[in-house]
Every structure is written in C-alpha cells, then in structure tokens.
C-alpha cells in the first residue's frame, strides 16, 4: 500500500513542475514495456467483425451482449427483417423489426462472399 502511495506521489510531483523550457515528463515503469510485455499484462485481444455475415456457429461463439448488438446491427444498419435475422442467427431478442431494406440486405450478404 505504501509503495503505491509513493509511486503516485512521485508521478504527481512532476506533473506541473516547470523547468526552464516547459513541463517535465515523469517516466513510469510502464513507459518502457515492450509490446510483448504489454500483451502479457493486458491479456489476449479478441477481434470481432460484426460488419460481416456470421455463421450460426460464429454467432453462438460471441458473448451475449455482442449477440444482441449484432442482431440490432442487422436490423438498423443492414435492413434485415425479423425472418432474415432469425435465419442468420436463430434469434431475434424480442426486437421490433420493420419491413426491412432488400438492397441493404443484399449488399450485406455480398460482403460475406468476398
């Protein structure tokens, strides 16, 4: 606990200190970490491409909040109807769907064929 307080006070002491030509930057241990060390410290990075059509298996592998977001994107951005969203994902999460937009939907499905 004392070590944390000491680090904090050292970092804050140089924050507004003026020396001749401007501010002094206080360097901390994390400033010199390599990319490998940052990755090890922050954990595995997952990238989800929700702008492309997902297979049912890929959809089910998503976390629950991203599943709901994906279905919302299908509805709002890509013009999916309830039936089209259910065909692609198997779920509609009780969202209200309009008539849909056939041109947007066709363009969205074409992205998956690239």
Image: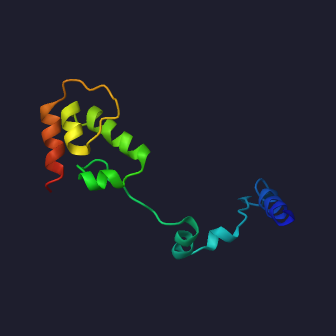
Q: Nearer the viewer, residue 32 or 21?
A: 32
Q: Quadrant of the C terminus?
A: bottom left
Please identify the quadrant where the N terminus is shown: bottom right
Pick the front one: 112 or 28: 112
Q: Tell me what residue is drawn at x 56 percent, y 65 percent.
A: 42
Q: Is residue 97 left or right of residue 40?
A: left
Query: Residue 33 versus residue 106: which sits nearer the camera?
Result: 106
Residue 70 coordinates in the image, percent (x, y): 33, 42
**Image quarter of residue 7:** bottom right
Across and down, in percent, residue 75 comes to 27, 33
Question: Which residue is found at the position 33% from the left and 52% from the top?
Answer: 60
Q: Is residue 41 left or right of residue 77?
A: right
Q: Position of residue 91 (x, y in %)?
A: 29, 39
Quadrant housing residue 25: bottom right
Name the residue furthest front.
Answer: 90
Q: Is residue 94 left or right of residue 33?
A: left
Q: Position of residue 104 (x, y in %)?
A: 17, 36
Residue at 31% from the left image edge and 51% from the top image edge: 59
In the picture shown, does residue 23 fall above or below 83? below
Q: Residue furthest right?
A: 2
């Amino acid at each position: 606990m004392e070590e944390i307080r000491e680090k904090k006070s050292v970092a804050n002491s140089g924050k507004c200190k003026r020396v001749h030509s401007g501010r002094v930057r206080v360097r901390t241990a994390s400033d010199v970490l390599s990319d490998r060390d940052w990755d090890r410290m922050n954990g595995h990075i997952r990238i989800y491409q929700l702008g492309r059509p997902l297979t049912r298996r890929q959809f089910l592998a998503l976390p629950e909040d991203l599943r709901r977001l994906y279905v919302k994107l299908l509805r709002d951005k890509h013009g999916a109807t309830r039936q089209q969203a259910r065909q692609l994902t198997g779920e509609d999460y009780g969202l209200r769907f309009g008539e849909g937009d056939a041109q947007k939907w066709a363009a969205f499905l074409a992205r998956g064929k690239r």
